[in-house]
Amino acid sequence: MESRSSSRAVGVTVHPPYDDDPDARIRRAWVTVHTRSASGEGLGAGVVVADGFLLTCAHVINAVLGRPKLATPEPTAPEMDAVAVSFPGVDATRYAVELAGWLAPQPQADQWWDGDLALLKVESGPAGLSPVPVGETPGKRLWTWYHHGAPRSLVDVVLQAGMGPWYILDPGHAPLEILPGHSGAPLWDREHGCVTGLVVSRERDNPRSYAIRASEMRDLLASAGVLPTVVTTVYDARTGACRDALIDVLDALPEQQLRRCADRVARALGLRRTPPTVTDLVDTVLPQHHPRGIPALLGALAAAEDVARRVRDAAAGLRPVRILTQNQYDELLALLGPGAHPEVRAAARHAVPHFVLPDPGTAGLDTLIEDLEDRVAEPGLVPPLVQVVEEVAAARRTDGDVLRDWSDRVTDRLGVSREAVRQCRWSADSRASVRTAQPVLRVWLWAAEPTADDFDYDMRLYDDHGHEVWARTNGPDRRSREELCAHLSEAVKELDHYDDTAGVEFLLEEGFFGMAVDRLPTDAGSVGTRPVGLDRVVVLRGQSVRRPGIWKVRWEHGRSCTAGPYVMLDHRTADSVLTRRNEIALVIACCPPDERDLALALCRYLGVPVVLWHRGAHGTDTADELRTVVPEDWRRHLREEVRLRRAEAPDDSTHMGAHLALLWEDPSWSPPRQRMAHPTREGGAA
């Protein structure tokens, strides 16, 4: 960047289209290229880009001269006598031209990778010609016409992607398509009143076409000393103030850092030329010029957090501002997959139900994502688009972590607080767990003493939609162990009607976690009786949670497959460790029996969601034995591993599996207890 000046050289200044017809200006600037000695239609098109100058394709000039299409030598002045142009939007007269600039087509591997432009000078054209601006725009829906510019030959195309000096064009919605006679025809952006490219070629037997970019056109004009027509952008007061603030922020950067920032922005946006001044850089990234300019600028300033923060503050009033860089946008589309529109739309209804979404009949996934990007979020909060991505990640069983990694990178760049992201992720997981819940039997159990044989209980079976489908309670009086097991047998038979279940969860009070509820016998028909934990996952839960916030934090940390267990050999040491380290989500409790109730109470107070212990043994040897039960991905597989150990000891009281206890406090749900009174230890209903 040779100059730190905030000003830039410009050509003739014009204003945006002044007719009701959005195509009026391009009609006045339309050019048809002819062979002077031949009658009939022309061989290609072109466009007037400055007073007395027009651009067309070099291969169109070659065709007029009867040369090979990809001939590279610059035509001589006598050869150019065979070339004529007309301006069908103004009159049908043919005019002589001179060659003012030549960028020969450069073929490589049967494709054109550079060049193919010719700049022509008209000494005296007709009155009424109107040069049009040339520049790259954020518009993706573009229009062009056949070489004679007739209104009924209009073709609309979609700018699919950039590829070096080219744009890749895919068909739009019109029944017409680009044909060889469209060579040199300008791509017209109606919304911005600007020519953004020149049609060059199309693939054989394929509707895909190519255009040379506006930046290449402007480079040829600059080398010829021709100042192209530009559009003076009139900013509203808010945008103008934000623009001035951005210029002030970037103008304070050291020269080398500013140059590096501009280079990175140019690469991120696919520009062919690095913005030379601070003002050029700011104008390049404004939403009016490129929808992903501000994200690209913030990405270029990733190593300068203080400057990035001031840029975010300065750009806060710009509307609309996309939040994703082009790479992040492309990556998100790839991660979601081509058929994800219904999934993302459903996630948006859950995450941002107050937003009105685009009509699903006409909007694709890209439109939906861009619409969500445009929704404003307060600084520091999770943007609506990221909320929706978190919703999708929570609902997916396979690649949810990959989407969360993407979300972390985006929110880090945007300066969103980690706590805000954690709360957003927690909410998404909670909603997803309700939608994808497995059938589960929940048993609230009270006993007068841990070794007592009379109980109060409340059993409820929930289906895979979280609806209560079966319930039993002990009634006004405590029931015996046999009566408890009879009702439990009835409940697990109902549970077994489902193909896949979450098993049985016993909700107990503190001090009663030592009860061997997984060994309660249940009726198995002709097989006799079997412990409930032999064939089904059985876990313990508390009946209340005093500090749900820290519970959620530890459970979120436990998502990582590398989150290993912490072995508790005495509760005093564990108190200090667990208080300092909130990333511990799994504890193997091997403290002495007289400390066990206190140790479990400590774990629950400090929000540890998962505790594994042996009811009859403790110490380091027991800890080593229990470690073998814990798989690497314990969050998914630990409950089933405990069940398998229990299955190894149906009648062997000396086997470790006969004494395993697992406290599993999944905080993503609160057990519903609607429509029934609940017993208490003292009797009566709560």
Image (cartoon, grey):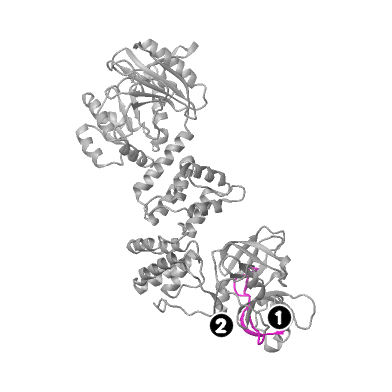
**x, y percent for residue 609:** 33, 34
The stretch in magenta equals 95-124
**Image quadrant containing the N terminus:** bottom left
Nearer to us in this view, 563 or 402: 402
Question: Is residue 103 shown in magenta?
Answer: yes
Q: Going 79% across and 76% down the picture, which residue do you hit?
A: 40
Give residue 85's mark.
1
**In the picture, which quadrant includes the C terminus?**
top left
Q: Does the magenta stretch include residue 365?
A: no
In the rendered image, which quarter is residue 12 located in? bottom right
- Mark 1 to mark 2 CA distance (whole Å): 19 Å
List the residue tagged with mark 2: 226
| Quadrant in the rendering for residue 478 | top left
Q: What residue type is labelled 2?
A: Val
Q: Horizontally, is 310 left or right of 131 in the view?
A: left
Q: Earlier in the sequence, mark 1 or mark 2?
A: 1
